[in-house]
Image (spheres, rainbow, N blue to C red):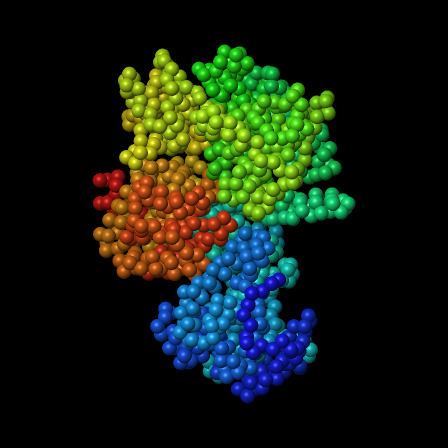
Amino acid sequence: MKTHSCKPPFYSDKDEIAVDPDLLKFCIDNGTHFGNTRVVFVQNGWRGVIATQNIHANTCVLRVPRKILLSCESARLDADIVAATSTCPPLSSISLLAVHLLHELSKGPASFWADYLRSLPPSYTTAISLSTTEASALQVPYAQHQVAIAARAADLRFTDQASPVLDNLNFPSKWRSRSAFLWALSALYSRTMFLGSDSEAGCLTPFGDLFNYEPPEAPYTPHLELSLTQEPLEERDCDATTASLTTPSGSGGDGCLNTETNEYCIYVRKDYSPGEEIFLCYGRYTNLELLEHYGFVLLGADQNPHDTAVLPWRVLPEAVIMQIEAIGGSAAEPIIHANGNPSWEFLRALRMAALTPAGRKLKSSAVLNDEKADDESEIWVMKTLIKACQESLGRLPTTLNEDEELLRKGGFKTEGLQNMSGAAGSVKVLLAGDVNGNFDALYKRVNTVNASNGPFAALLCVGPSFNAEGADDADYVGELLPYINGEKTVPVPTYFIGGFGLGSSKALAALATTPNCNIKYLGRAGVAQIHGLQIAFLDGTYNAAAYRGPSLATAAEVDEANPTTTTPTPTGVGACRYFSPSDIDSVKLAVANAEGDIDFLLTNGWPAALCAGLPEAAVPPDSKFPGGSEACAELAVAVRPRYHIAGGEHFFYTRAPYLNPDLGAGTLATRFISLGNVGNTTKQKWLHALGVVPASQMTPEELSTSPQGATKSPYLRMSAKRAAEGQPDNTGGGDDGLGEQSWRWHDRSKRARAPIAAPSLGRADVTKDKAKTAFVRNVPFRATEDDILSFFSQAGAVVDIVRKGNQEGKLNSYCHVQFDTKEAMERACQLNGSELMGRQIYIEPASTEERSKTPLQVQPVQGCWFCLSNPNADTALVASVGEECYVALDKGPITDRHVLVLPVEHHACTVETPTNTTSEIDRYMSALKSCFAAEGKELVAFERFMRLRKSGGNHCHVNAIAVPADAGKNAATVFESVAARHGFGFTRLPPASGQEAKDALSAVVQKGEYFVAFLPDGSRLVHPIAYGERHPLNFGREVLAELAGVPHRADWKECQGTPEEEEQRTEAFRNAFKGFDIMLQ
C-alpha cells in the first residue's frame, strides 16, 4: 500500500543491524538498565526483544531514565517551544509532543535525542496517511467514516493548533509542512508509551519501543441466557463488573512512570524462557484502532479477540436506538464482539427496549445487574440481534458479480460463487410473469429451479395474479387457498402485485391475516425493502376511463372498462384493478423518501415509447408490441430503477439498457424485462433469475457505470414531442402527471380542476355546518381538491372543502371537509390515521362539542415511546400538552430543568413538521426561554434527527435545558470544541423563526439526517450527518451537561430516578412553568 510520509533528513537506507550501537550507547550513557534481554531480528525481518535468561512474571525488564523520555514535560522545558507557544492558542498534549518531535528532528545531529531519532521509521501506514482511494478500499462505510474522522482530526490539529507554533519556531519549511506533521502524529500514535499524567500523548521511550505487542486475554462477553428454543445456555462464572476491571481499551499496556525513581519501567506479565520473544500488551484495540494507531490489523477472532463490528443504526428498531441514546455514550453503541456476542452495554439496551414502561419499573434493576428480565423479552432480544446482524451482513459490499464474470470468461464453472451470493451481498431473486391464478404451476417450476440453482431470497410476481376476467369481490376458491391455509408451503418467499381478478379481494384479506404463509401482496403503490433491495411497485393497469375519471373519459373508453371495476378502489383498501394519478404520486413520494437508489420497479404493464430509438431488429413485432401508457413512462422517469419488470403482455422481451439523465450523481442504467404468463403454451419465458447487489451496497461509481450497448433514455423523445406540442414535460398525461380528472360536485355543473397545490376557498352556495364537517390535519402539500375529494368520497357525499394558505403564501397542512350528513362525517373520522398520497392524516370532528363525543383515534406507531396515543408512552413525565405539541421531562435528566419539546403526532424532524406544528414548537421554546430567564438562566437546546426504518421511524424531539447565563454565552464555543474532538464541524445559521427558520435549516441538510444546536441568541449550529457517518449518539448530552456544570451527568446511567422521584420532579416543573405555559395563557 502506498504511504504518504515525511522522512527524517539524516535517515540512512543502509541495512540495519538489530540495534543501532549509537542508540545503545546513548541509552547506557544516560543510565538505562536492561533486565536479561537482547534485541534481535525476529520473524519477517522485524526487530524484537527476547529473554536471555528465565524471567518471571512482574519482573522489570527495562528502566529508562525520565530525562531521556521525549514527552510534553521535556517540550515545556524547551525555551524555543515555550516562546513559540506563548502567542498561540493552547496546544493539546499530542499536538505539543508532535511539534517537539519535529523541532528536535530539525536540529539534526545537534539534538540531544539524535541517536534515538535516527531509529524512527521513514514512513507509516496509519489511518491518517491513507489516500482517498486507499480509504475507499476499506469498503465498510463505518470504517471509511472512522478513517475520515481521524484524517480530519489530524488536519484540524495541524491547521488550528500546530501550524502557528511551527511558523513561530522558524526552522526549515519541510519540518513545518502538513506531511511532516502527519508523519510526527503517526510516529506518536504507533510508538508512544502510557503516561498517567499525560494520557493522550504519552511519551517516546528510547529502546522501549523496540518491544513488540500482542493483545491481552479475550474479553469477557455476555451470553444470552436463552436460545430461541428456550434451552439454557452456559452459566457465567463472573459478572460484568469483574470483567470491566481487565485491561481497558487502548490502555498503556505494561509500562508506567515510577515517580519515586524517575524512571520509565516496563514489566512482563508472564514467565519467559531464554530465547522467547517478550511481548507487551497494547490493550483491547479493535482492528480499526490498530490501523489508526499502529498501521496493521490482526485477521481472525483468534488473532484479535478484541475486534468488534458496529451495526448500522438503521438495522435496529427505534426502541433500541432510543434506549441506547438514553443510556448514553459510545459504550452503548450496537457492538458485536469477535466471538459473536454483543457488548454488555448493548445487551442492557436491548433488554431494556424489550420491556414496557411498566416492565422497566419492575425489572430494570435486574437488567442493570446484567441479568435477563424474563424469558419472553430474552427471546425478543435474540431475534432482534439475529435480524440486525443478517441485515447488516446483507449491506456489505461484494465483488461476486465481477468475479463470476471473470470466471465465466475464462471458461470456469460459477456454481460455487452463486451459492455464496447470500453471504457475499448479492441477492438472488426469481421474477415471474402473469400468474393468472396458476399458483400450483408457478410453485412447481420455482421449486425445481430453487433446488438446482438456489437458494433464492425472493420471488417477485408481476401481471395479474388472479384470473383477470372474474369479479374482484367474488368468493375465492383458487389454487392459493392451500398455501394460505398451511396445507402447502411455498419454496421461496413470494411478493406480488396484480392483486385483482376473480375473488382477489377475499384472497388478499385472507393473506393479510396469515402473514406466516410467506406470500405477501405488496400493496397498491409504494416502496418495499426486501433483503436490502429497494423495490418500487405500482399495482393495477392503465385504463383511460378509470385514470381520467368518467367525466373526462370518452364513451368508447368507458365501454372498454369492466363495468364492475371502473371506479378505482380507495388507496390501501382491497384489490386494485386500475391505478389512478394519486397512485403514481404515492410511488413518487415513497421513492423520494426512500434511502438510496431503487433496484426494481414492478408494474403490470409497459411504459409508452419504451422502444423509441431502437433499431428495427430490436423492437418486438407489431403483433406483440403493446402501446404502453404514458403514466407508466412518467413513473419510470421519476423512479429511475435499475430494473423495470413488467407483465401483462404475455411474452418475454428484454430491452437494451437505457441511461437515465444525469441529475448530479452520474447516469444510472435501467434494464427493462417483460415476462410471459405462467404455464403458457407458446414457450414464452415466464420465470427469470437474477443475482443483484443492492444499490445501497454499491459505490456511486459502480452505479453510474454505463453497460455495453446502452442507449439514451427512450422517454427523452416523448418529452421533446410533448414540449413541441406545448404540453407539460412530465411524460405522463398532463397536469404534472396527475391526470385531468375534473372535480365532480354533487348537483353542480362541471368545474375546471384547480391548479395543483392551490388553496380551496370553499363554495359560497353551501351553508357551513360544523356538525357535518371533519377537521383534517397533516394533509400533503401536493394534495389537490381532487385528491381530497377522491379520498373522502368513500365516507359519503362531500359538499365543500376549505383549505386556505398561510401568511407566507404556502398551503396550510390542514383543511375542513363538509359532508351532506353528520353520519358521513362520522364515517370519515373512522378513517383517522389512514394515508393520503403516502402521508398519514388525522381526522376529527370540526365541532368542539362533537370532538369531545368522538374520541380521537390516532393510530399510535408501535414501539414509539413519544406517541402519546401509544399505551406504552410514559405520560407521567408530561408537563404540558398543546394543540400540536407537548412538553415532557427527560427520562434521564441532566438537571431538573431538562425537558423535551415534541409534536403530538409522529413527525420525523422539525424540517418535516407542518407549519402549525412548527409554530407551536417555536411558541413552547419561547415560553421555556422566558421561564428559564426568570430564574437567571439561558436556554440551550439541540435536535438530532436519524431517519430510522423501524417502529415508524424517528419521532421528532428537541432537548432543551436551562444553563447558567455565563455558560450560555459560551455555548457556541463549547459545541464547536467538542465537535472538533469528534472530527466534525458546524454551519452557523443566523436567528430566524417560523418558515424562514425551517427553510434555512432545510437548505443546509436537504433531505438528510442532521444535528442542530439552538443557542441563546437565537442562532443555530447545524451539522448534516452524511450517509454512513458514525455520529456520536451522546454528543448533545455531553455538551449540555458540560454547559450545565454537571459533566458527569452526560451518562444517562448517572441520571436514573425512581417513579416517585420522576413524579415529584415533573410536578415541580409544572409549577415553575405554570406562569409561562402557552396553554394556560
Observer-nearest of 468 and 33: 468
Residue 752 quadrant: top left
Compared with 853, 390 (above or below) is below
Q: Residue at x 48, y 15 (%)?
A: 553
Please say whether residue 372 is visible from this viewpoint: no
Please say whether residue 906 is visible from this viewpoint: yes
Q: Which residue lies furthest to the front in this view?
A: 724
Residue 686 quadrant: top right
Q: Which residue is drawn at 68% across and 35% down?
A: 689
Compared with 43, 798 (above or below) is above
Q: Position of residue 766 (x, y in %)?
A: 29, 17
Compared with 571, 99 (above or below) is below
Q: Which residue is drawn at 55% across and 37% down?
A: 660
Q: Is residue 462 left or right of residue 565?
A: right
Observer-nearest of 1055 and 515: 515
- Quadrant where the N terminus sits is bottom right
Q: Residue at x 38, y 52 (%)?
A: 987
Observer-nearest of 527 and 716: 716
Q: Where is residue 526 in the image (x, y as percent from the top left)?
A: 51, 32
Q: Position of residue 234 (x, y in %)?
A: 61, 54
- Quadrant where the C terminus sits is top left
